[in-house]
Image: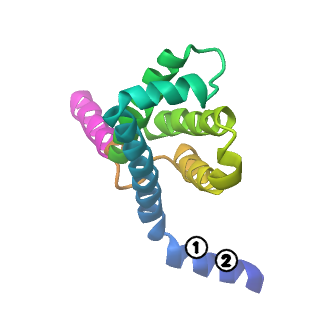
Amino acid sequence: MGWFARIDRFMAGGTAWLVPLVLLLTRLWVANVFFHSGMLKLSDWDSTLFLFEDEYHVPLLPPDIAAYIGTAIEIGGSTILALGILTRPIGLLMFGFNIMAVLSYPLLWKNGFFDHQLWGAMLLMNVLWGGGFFSLDRLLSALSGRRLTLQAS
């Protein structure tokens, strides 16, 4: 084994314990951002409807329906993501939502595009690797496996 491979193996072994923490951090970070955005929309629904009618240009949906769906995804999706339930599909849904936010609100390109890129990368990490050790996905999977084992005995 070459010295590059030895260094890589050493680093991988020394940092493996960080992966579950990074997955938890990314879930909580993105969930917090989207949850607060959804709550802000709820706090002034008239303004939210105005924004969806005049500023956000969501394709294929009437503005009021887009407002309801968007707010529901921000609040409900972020809550589910934070808990780590169905992390991969919810992460994918929110990744798509994030892309739609950027496409439907061109002003984000100037001031907020970097943030949306960061959130997209964080969401993709959870789509690709799941919720990790600190997720309800893992707990439910472990409980489900125990039940199946107990039933088979």
Residue 75's spot in the image, x, y percent? Answer: 37, 36
Q: Is residue 140 magenta?
A: yes
On the rendered image, what quadrant is the N terminus found in?
A: bottom right
Residue 111 lies, with reference to residue 144, above or below; the image says below
Indicate left or right for 111 with 140 as reference.
right
Residue 4 lies, with reference to residue 76, above or below; the image says below
**Residue where numbered disc 2 is placed:** 8
**Residue where numbered disc 1 is placed:** 12
Q: Image quadrant of residue 142?
A: top left
Residue 76's spot in the image, x, y percent? Answer: 36, 33
Color scheme of the displayed model: rainbow
Quick one: label 2, few (<14), some, or many (20+) residues within 10 Å? Answer: few
Q: Which residues are magenta?
A: 139-153
Asked whether residue 149 appears in the rendered view, the answer is yes
Quick one: label 1, few (<14), some, or many (20+) residues within 10 Å? Answer: few
Q: Is residue 149 magenta?
A: yes
